[in-house]
Amino acid sequence: MDKIWLSSPHMGGGEQKYVQEAFDTNWVAPLGPNVNGFEKDLENYLGEKSHVACLVSGTSALHLALILSGVGYDDEVLCQSITFSASANPIVYQRAKPVFVDSEKDTWNMCPVFLEKAIKERISKGKKPKAIIVVHLYGMPAKMDEIATIAKKYEIKLIEDAAEALGSSYKGQKCGTFGDFGILSFNGNKIITTSGGGALVCNTDEVKKRAVFLATQARDNAPHYQHSHIGYNYRMSNITAGIGRGQMEVLDKHINYRRANNNFYKEVFKNVEGVEVFTESSSDYFSNHWLSSVIIDKKKTGFSREDLRLSMLEDNIESRPLWKPMHMQPIFKDCLYYGSKISEKLFDYGLCLPSGSNLTHNDKLRIKSSIEKLID
Ligand SMILES: *Cc1c(COP(=O)(O)O)cnc(C)c1O
């Protein structure tokens, strides 16, 4: 039996046409009509106030967001603890220090209460944080009203890691457009993929131009190579942008499939006491449900998240524990942490289930019967 993956690439059909066009016109370079076209598509999708720079990865987008926020040596940056390490690594690229913040239970994202507590305490120590990185985990929007209000109150730059949340929205506004910067990822496992890639969402065209300048080796305006800044080679290729244009044609369709997966899991676990399928806590939230996940209370179910993971693996079905919080990671063990045990508990009890937009009816039958082996 074929492996059922957590989230695998799902092409829509139009991608190769744009890639072929790039070959036909010899735009095989880190610029060209597909890069411009993909940026336009994303701007149209996110709303008129967004200015998008396509880059080689979500990680590079975060790095540029920090640079453009003025983060440098010895600065402190507040970062959601439960996330993928790529949210935090660019802080260290800037030789700044991550300060991790716990989650709240509704969205699993940054807790506004611990965030404000952290800010007040860091200010009292003479270390006002330079930026906040909030994540929309698994596509679920964070509590953006509260978090944006706090960022504004203390005049701290807000960076939204929307790598997993393209198409999600909070109170009708698209994730990635709330902060001073938003970042997107088009890695192979994300809601749309360009094989690898990312984007930085800026609020003005001026800031976007600055991002593109830094992403293309920071060349000054001169006939020779002249540099007054350190530059980066972070611009997206016109080939991968072609894949992105094709993927934009099916984005909303793929979100509907992912949301249907979430309903499928609600149905599977409907009568199972001790299993909670993660979903929106109110109509303010619209999740793309990039990955559907469950919290398993072993005391009630008799099986743990690890029991379920191993049992599904026997049936050649991939699942994965939730992100291990950054404050529990060996590499970040000396970093400050503000919170209690919410993110730690999510890690202990949570499991991500197969969630691809390309899951077939047959795949779902296999998943269902694999899960039911443990339930019965
Ligand atoms: C995937 C991901 C990133 C990194 O994006 P890349 O394109 O892989 O560099 C950053 N943050 C989160 C939360 C992610 O899931």
Image (cartoon, rainbow, N blue to C red):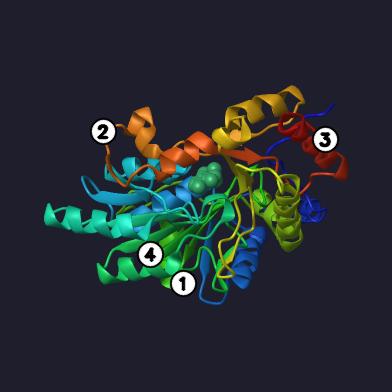
- Disc 3 and disc 1: Cα gap in Å? 48 Å
Tell me, yes or no, whether the two marked residues, 2 and 4, touch with CB atoms within 8 Å.
no
Measured Cα–Cα span from mark 3 to mark 4: 41 Å
Of pointers 4 and 1, the one earlier in the residue sequence: 4
Q: Are marks 3 and 4 in contact (CB under 8 Å)?
A: no
Q: Which mark is residue 334?
A: 2
Q: Residue at x 25, y 56 (%)?
A: 117
Q: Residue at x 55, y 57 (%)?
A: 140
Please tell me the numbered disc located at residue 147: 4
Q: Amino acid at mark 4?
A: Ile
Whether label 1 lies within 8 Å of ligand 1 gets the answer: no
> Measured from the top left, where is residue 210 in percent x and y?
40, 63
> On the rendered structure, is 270 left or right of 125?
right
Question: What amino acid is labelled 1 in the image?
Answer: Asp
Q: Quadrant of residue 343?
A: top left
> Which sits earlier in the primary sequence, circle 2 or circle 1?
1
Q: Distance of mark 2 from mark 1, alpha carbons?
A: 39 Å
Q: Which mark is residue 366?
A: 3
Q: How far from the left and from the top, in percent, is residue 290?
A: 64, 51
In-front residue for pair 240/184? 184
The quadrant of the rendering that contains the C terminus is top right
Label 1, secondary structure: give it: helix
The label number, if any, that marks residue 205 in the structure image? 1
Is disc 4's CB within 8 Å of ligand 1?
A: no
Quadrant placement of the N terminus: top right
- The local crowd at label 3, few if under 14, some if 14 to 19, many if 20 or more residues have their Cα within 10 Å, is some
